[in-house]
Image: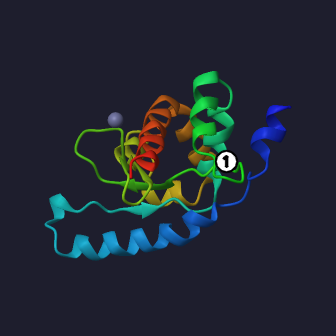
Amino acid sequence: MALGLLFGAGLGVTPYHATVTGPVVERVEMYLDRSRSVQEQERVRWIAGGTVEEETIAVLSKNPVGRDTLNALRDRFGVIRLPSFFLSRQESSYAEHSSAFDAVYLNENELTSRGWTVEDFLRDPEKQRRLIREMDSTILHELTHAVQGRRSP
Ligand SMILES: [Zn+2]
């Protein structure tokens, strides 16, 4: 079967799971930030719109390891269920994964080091696609955590 058929089904559609959990996680984190010092605020923002998921599937499906990882994230109907993607302020890592929220957090430094603001990034699908392409090995790494997180009880 062509890759387009294998991976194309969900393209352009924000995963249902993310449309539910994305805004909730963002609101909870904004609330928690209010009781944190400025230096400790995480500034979690949900990356809405479905572009990062679409580009993740497009990029990772180009190589065997990426395809294996995507296949391990399929649900019982065969649909690839990616974690929700967020931005957050992090000390040193490129990205983090939360099993509890089934979420990947990209470090907002990855935007600022490219000369972008968070707001620029959140409304620009082309920047989102570029970041996913340039962070492909990091994304793959975080998705392996997502696979492990779903397997553990
Ligand atoms: Zn890791």
Rendering quarter of residue 113: top left
Q: Position of residue 127 (x, y in %)?
A: 57, 46
Rendered position, 78 above or below 1: below
What's the residue at 40%, 69% (across, down)?
26
Question: In the picture provided, is 77 more to the left or to the right than 95?
Answer: right
Q: Which residue is mark 1?
A: 54
In this rendered view, identify the residue nearer to me: 34 or 141. 141
Rendered position, 65 above or below 54: above
Rendering quarter of residue 146: top left
Question: In the picture provided, is 129 more to the left or to the right than 141?
Answer: right
In this rendered view, identify the residue nearer to me: 77 or 80. 77
Which residue extends farthest front?
153
Q: Residues within 10 Å of mark 1 (few under 14, many from 20)?
A: many
In this rendered view, identify the residue nearer to me: 48 or 102. 102
Rendered position, 15 above or below 6: below
Q: How many marks?
A: 1
What's the residue at 40%, 41% (across, down)?
110
SS label for mark 1: helix
Quadrant of ligand 1 in image: top left
What's the residue at 52%, 32% (across, down)?
136
What's the residue at 58%, 60% (across, down)?
123
Question: In the picture provided, is 7 more to the left or to the right than 122?
Answer: right
Q: Quadrant of the N terminus?
A: top right
For the residue with label 1, is its CB less than 8 Å from the closest atom of ligand 1?
no
Q: Position of residue 91 (x, y in %)?
A: 22, 45
